[in-house]
Image (cartoon, grey):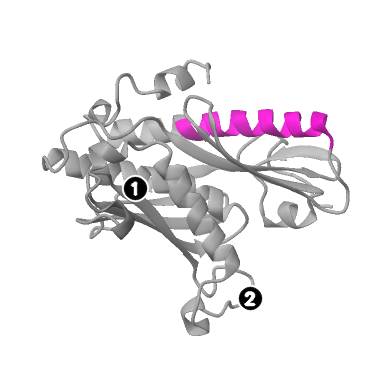
Amino acid sequence: MPERKDRNSTELRPITITPNYIIHAEGSALIECGKTRVICTASVEEKSPPFLRGSGRGWITSEYGMLPRSTGSRMVREVSKGRASGRTQEIQRLIGRSLRSVVDPQVLGERTIWIDCDVIQADGGTRTSSVTGGFIALALALMKLKSEKVISGAPLLDYVGAVSVGIVDGEPRLDLDYEEDSAAQVDMNIIMTGKGLFVEVQGTAEMKPFSRQELDLLLELGRAGVRKLVQKQQAILQETLPSLFELFQGEPASHATASGNP
């Protein structure tokens, strides 16, 4: 079984978020979680999907992909196969749902924001990194819309972050890398807001079912991990966006997170 030599079971991998990583996108970020690296961009399209036309509401959606050598052996590009895999479609929907959960669609207006998440190096947690980094790209794009007076209200309801947890060799662990994920008896992805509300929980047992007690332990471990990620998001955005408060409806929920009350 894989052992952690560089961190304990409740520690996140080292995380770095570089905002404005791509010059052409309305918002972008490079997120590095351990050895996993994902480029997240936010692109604004001045129209909403057909099912929202005339509603006055906007939409946030996502596309996700992995470079051929982001993994140990070369992956065939999905465009060569003619369609996205089931895994890719699932992750795209997850990212979109997660980011829509913290945006007011009425304030966004009839436009679409595309969040593109491109994995350039994978070592576990690519979908959770995409959610966490995608939020930064989204916030930067929203601030651009607000500064250009394209939108007038405060579109953000909260922060959102995601992290993996699991049971490896009988031990609950936070933020699994690929080796740990491959050996996990339980693998779970947790998406939460800055207020500590759940957006999504994906949990699966491999071979051996897990108990309610173990589930509670993993949820608490994930909650603590997301809190740290949100604090990282807050620090990045406060440094990058002097008028960050203009994006939030009322007081940014991160104030509660930073004080230790999820």
Name the residue rendered at 73%, 36% in the picture: 9
In the shown orientation, is residue 219 left or right of residue 53? right
For disc 1, the marked residue is: 137
From the image, state whether disc 1 or disc 2 is nearer to you.
1
For disc 2, the marked residue is: 73
* Relative image position of residue 165 (x, y in whole percent): 68, 41
Look at label 1 and name its amino acid. Answer: Ala
Residue 33 appears anywhere in the view: no
Q: Find the residue positioned furthest to the left.
A: 149
Front residue of 112 and 52: 52
Residue extent of the magenta highlight: 211-230
Residue 248: quadrant of the picture: top left
Could you tell me if the residues under marks 1 and 2 are in contact, i.e. CB atoms within 8 Å? no
Name the residue rendered at 19%, 44% in the picture: 144
The prevailing secondary structure element of the residues shown in magenta is helix
* Disc 2 element: loop
Name the residue rendered at 37%, 47% in the picture: 18
Residue 237: quadrant of the picture: top left
* Relative image position of residue 117 (x, y in whole percent): 43, 58
Name the residue rendered at 13%, 43% in the picture: 150
* Relative image position of residue 87 (x, y in whole percent): 59, 64
Front residue of 140 and 198: 198
Looking at the rendered structure, which numbered label has been put on residue 4? none
